[in-house]
Amino acid sequence: MLIKTKGSKERFTKTNDIRIDQEVQHTFKNFHKLRWINLKEDDFTNLPEFQRITRKFADYINHIDEWLKEE
């Protein structure tokens, strides 16, 4: 998901897409190193450790917009 802020003069280009893909892939590799997910190329599955995190922080995840406004 790309979000363009109001007044931003940045143009989304193929280079931006490549950079975003690289960052997402890097993040998934780090999750794999932590044993939070199994990663095979573009496919991944959650492991129990990651599911514990999502259960613990589900309220924050589901209401992130409201939580950020409070900060």
Image (cartoon, grey):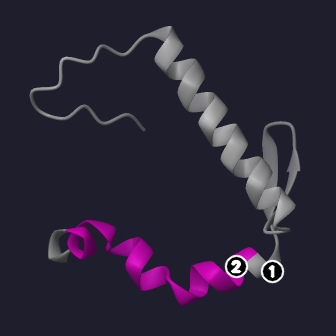
In the rendering, at what x and y percent does residue 63 appear?
32, 74
User: Does 68 appear above or below 43?
Assistant: below
The residue beneath circle 2 is 51
SS of the residue at dot 2? helix
Q: How many tags in the picture?
A: 2
SS of the residue at dot 1? helix
**Residue 4 painted magenta:** no
Quadrant of residue 38 within the rendered picture: bottom right
Identify which residue is drawn at 83% across, 58% down: 32
In the rendering, at what x and y percent does residue 1 appear?
42, 38
Mark 2 surroundings within 10 Å by alpha-carbon count, few (fewer than 14), some (14 through 19), many (20 or more): some
Identify which residue is drawn at 20% across, 74% down: 71
Q: Tell me the amino acid under the disc marked 1.
A: Pro
In the rendering, at what x and y percent does residue 5 appear?
19, 35
Mark 1 surroundings within 10 Å by alpha-carbon count, few (fewer than 14), some (14 through 19), many (20 or more): few
Identify which residue is drawn at 30% across, 13% down: 11
Q: Using residue 19 as the reference point, say whether residue 41 is left or right of it.
A: right
The answer to whether the residues at label 1 and label 2 have Cβ atoms under 8 Å apart is yes
Segment tinted magenta in the rendering: 50-68
The residue beneath circle 1 is 48
User: Does 29 appear above or below 34?
Assistant: above
Q: Tell me the amino acid under the disc marked 2.
A: Gln
Quadrant of residue 47 within the rendered picture: bottom right
Q: Which mark is residue 30?
A: none
Q: Using residue 31 as the reference point, say whether residue 54 is left or right of it.
A: left
Q: Nearer the viewer, residue 58 or 34?
A: 34
User: Does 55 appear above or below 14?
Assistant: below
Q: Using residue 62 as the reference point, say whether residue 23 is left or right of it.
A: right
Quadrant of residue 18 within the rendered picture: top right
